Image (tube, rainbow, N blue to C red):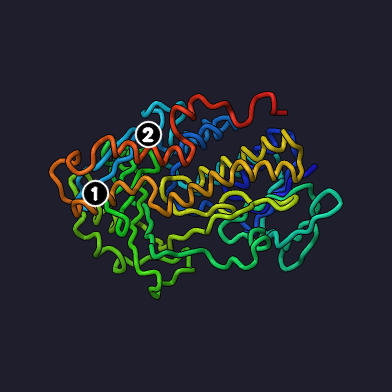
Amino acid sequence: MTVIIAGAGIGGLTAALTCHELGIPVKVYEQVSKITPLGVGINLQPHAVREIFEMGLAAEIEAIGVRTKEVAYFSKKGLPIHAEARGVWAGYKWPQYSIHRGELQMMLLAAVRARLGDVVETGAAVLSFTEGAGGVTVQVERAGEVTAERGDVLIGADGLHSKIRAGFYPEEGAPIWAGAVLWRGTTKAAPFLTGASMAMAGHARQKFVTYPISAPDENGEAMINWIAELWFEPDSKWNREDYNRQGKLADFLPAFENWGFDWLDIPALIRAADKIYEFPMIDRNPLARWSFGRATLLGDAAHAMYPIGSNGATQAILDARVLGRCFVEHGVNGAALEAYDAERRPKCNAVVLANRGNGPDQVMQVVEDRTGGAFDNIDDVLSEVERLEMAKAYKRIAGFDMDVLNDAPSIISTDMKK
């Protein structure tokens, strides 16, 4: 009874830890030869943090993350639109964390190695699989040599360019680019607003997002993560398929040159960055099915989504936990994968579509449409009732409505654990 996982990202590692917690043997194959802390800042919502805590990693995530106190929206003129408390400050039983994606991955990897031993094999790419005789045979490539590995089920947690997904849907093609380009960086600077705020300014076609991902040092400076976003026509001649290209200030800074606000000097923050990377904002269409026999998809392989609403890594963690519970309820077999698919896929598909509609950030676009970003009193533009309902609607879709989450039972109960 062995679960084979393709991919040692956040979702795959969470699945490995969950299987171990439930007494299920697991093997993880990762195509890169060495796992390093790549990426930029992300946020984990309280329902994912709850799972991290229940996996016994509360101290570890507390050591590398910042407990987000609020999310605050501003117009392109820097005027406040809406702010609301986050995590424990909002009344959740669990915090929301702003964290470096790579550090979160390395935290999970360290836990896998400490608890499971040498189950993550790097430099090993899962190419394909066949099913038969009560299990799966997985083709794994190492240094140009392909061997067959046997297991009971296969979890395709191999990311945006998943080979497992491509095997299920060979005609799908490349990810979808609708026109947005993101320039992302980190800058050592003094925190702003509450000191642990996630701030967003602008509107759908031009936006700036920023938040600290470390505690302040002895000089009062923290590592500030930021994202500058601009939209172009979808048929623009932009290099859309290079996901880790160094960004150029000339390509985006002029658009933000006048965004020096009393709460944050955005041009100065951009100029002081160590490195800037350029990414196309892409996703994939929702699928009608994730699970086929004894193989399924998880995380970005299943539901790559726009980085809106802080839900990419969050939903991958929830995938892994629900899949673990389905193994307990149905066995390590195709029935478990079907149950997982039926529960998680509709929810994640709804988040993908909500993010295409600008998710909770739509509050900024409404203000832009009505005022051009300049106003005297936000309540005359968009009432507090309207603003709160827009935020609540997204939380319901993404599964972190506070009252529902606080009262919900654990995904994996104590009596399920080995």
Q: Quadrant of residue 43?
A: top left
Badge 2, how many Cα within 10 Å: few under 14, some, many 20+?
A: many
What's under tag 1, amino acid-wise?
A: Val
Q: Is residue 392 left or right of residue 33?
A: left
Local secondary structure at mark 2: loop
Image quarter where the N terminus lies is top right
* Residue most extreme to the right: 133
Tag 1 residue: 367
**Residue identifier under label 2:** 86
| Left or right: 299, with 365 as reference point | right
Q: Position of residue 85 (x, y in %)?
A: 33, 33
Q: Quadrant of residue 376?
A: top left
Q: Nearer the viewer, residue 324 or 68?
A: 324
> Where residue 409 sits: x, y (%)?
57, 26
Percent from the top left, x then y, of residue 239?
A: 43, 72
**Measuring 67% from the left and 35% from the top, which residue is drawn there?**
325
- Tell me if mark 1 has few (under 14), some (14-19) or many (20+) residues whose alpha carbon lies within 10 angstroms of its own: many
Mark 1 in CB contact with mark 2 (< 8 angstroms): no
> Mark 2 or mark 1, which is nearer the start of the sequence?
2
Residue type highlighted by circle 2 = Arg
CA separation in Å, label 1 and label 2: 22 Å
Q: Residue 417 in the image: x percent, y percent?
A: 69, 28
Q: Nearer the viewer, residue 265 or 221?
A: 265
Q: Is residue 318 above or below residue 28?
A: above
Tell me the element at label 1: helix
Front one among 214 and 181? 181
